[in-house]
Amino acid sequence: MWGPPPGGEEPRQRLHPLSPAVHGAKSLVVVIAGLSWSTLSRVGFGWFAVLVAVFVLGATVLSVISWWNTGYHVVGRELRVHEGLLWRRTRAIPLERLQAVEVVRPLLAQLTGLAELRLEVVGGGKTEAPLAYLSVAEATALRQRLLAVAGRAPASAPADPATPAPPAPAGRRLHAVRNQDLLVSQLLTPQAFLLPFGLAFVVAQFLSEGSWSFIAVASTLTAMAGVLLQPVRRVLDDWSFRLDRDGDTLRVHNGLLETRMQTVPLHRVQAVGVTWPLLWRVKGWLRLRLEVAGYSAAEPDDRNRPDRLLPVGDRRTGELVVAEVLPGVRLGALPATPPPPRARWLRPLSRAAVGAGLDEQVFVARSGLLTRRLTLVPYARIQSVRVTQGPAQRRLRLATVHADTAGGAGAAAVDRDLADAWELAAELTARARHARRGDRGR
């Protein structure tokens, strides 16, 4: 048991007692995959089962010890997580740096009625303080409390863990993606078009006498699995995608095998990205993503970045969602002028496809030839403005203007006329300063 909390602090809470069992079950899959079939053929099934049991038992014992020594509680405006057996460690996460909170339910957690809470903070190199696992009610209540503290809501008395959490407000539904559209969108990808050629190659390997081997076929099947992995993973991740607005926050629900419920305060949004893949333009579809500080740099894997705003939708839906996230911004009426004609020496094919402009609310940057992209950065989110020149740009009197955001990629106006680039940089700096002053005044 934990000792009495000092200074009247609320007591530390442990994770759910089933957490070690879930971690042990996950270890079972990893151990079996790691030992491989070659180990089974060498030692036989009996010894193979003994090895698996020993590894899983050891992992479960370590999980139990870790669970016993792990606790968390909210102290003032910090979430403190205590962990470690030989080396005790306490992590204090300042809640004013909180960007988003996710309630994630992998398949094993769904089967046991558990959930994992993940925090994203400004400047974090990875997800902070992942609490795995809590009951769904406890994870939901803790998420609401952390967001309330982060939003400087009036502090309330610590909740009694035995008291069930009140149901979350329903909010206002912005959009729900049809699963049929999600499936079709992933069929309209280069991977889907390459699949028949891959299957034909495998069949040809088997039918041609003496020209195939187990290694060749296995490598081909592995390559095909890698090609299919991304679209299949996107379908599973974005299944039953729903987007709600609850006051000044967005709530995203998605996932089939692993369900996610993400909550993002609107004032934490750094930028919105719009993408029109080449094959999607036949149906007039687009994709929307958020840039929230801490995601872009922290998670190179697209799957682990909870930044989805609209996985697939038509232009009208995209305009409605963008207007909710960035009030006053009309997606169909954004200015973007191309670079000067001499930039064709650097961009012979894509000069007309890139551009930049200043809207009343956002900085607009356009790019992409086959896959068109549009990045919208609110002026209040611009942290710095840079003007850069490469050797070829210097000879052509061109420059690139970068608008950097907190922990993200921001946007760039590429290959602008040198004088125009410095004027654009000065205007961006002035608008960013004015917008931040307005935010502080509200």
Image (spheres, helix red, strand yellow):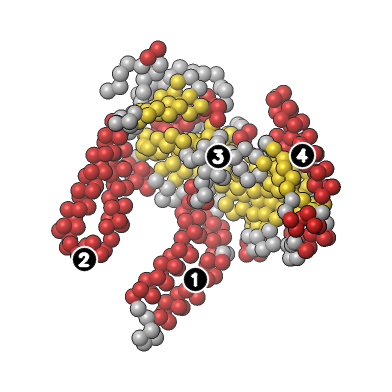
Residue 318 visible here: no
What's the amino acid at mark 2?
Ser
Residue at (40% x, 70% y) in the render? 219
Q: Quadrant of residue 35?
A: bottom left
Of badges 1 and 2, the one in the foreground is 2
- Disc 2 crowd, CA 10 A, few/some/many (<14, 14-19, 20+): few
Real-space CA distance between mark 2 and mark 3, rounded to the nearest whole angstrom: 46 Å
Q: Secondary structure at mark 2?
A: helix
117 or 60, which is in the foreground?
60
Q: Pick whichever of labels 3 and 4 is earlier in the sequence.
A: 3
| Callout 3 touching callout 4 (CB < 8 Å) | no
Q: Pick whichever of labels 2 and 3 is earlier in the sequence.
A: 2
Please state the horizontal and vertical placement of residue 52, each as a whole percent of the image: 22, 52
Q: Which residue is mark 3?
A: 294
Q: Which mark is residue 41?
A: 2
Real-space CA distance between mark 4 and mark 2, rounded to the nearest whole angstrom: 66 Å
Q: Quadrant of the N terminus?
A: top left
Residue at (73% x, 48% y) in the render? 388
Q: Quadrant of residue 226?
A: bottom left
Q: Pick whichever of labels 1 and 2 is earlier in the sequence.
A: 2
Q: Which mark is residue 195?
A: 1
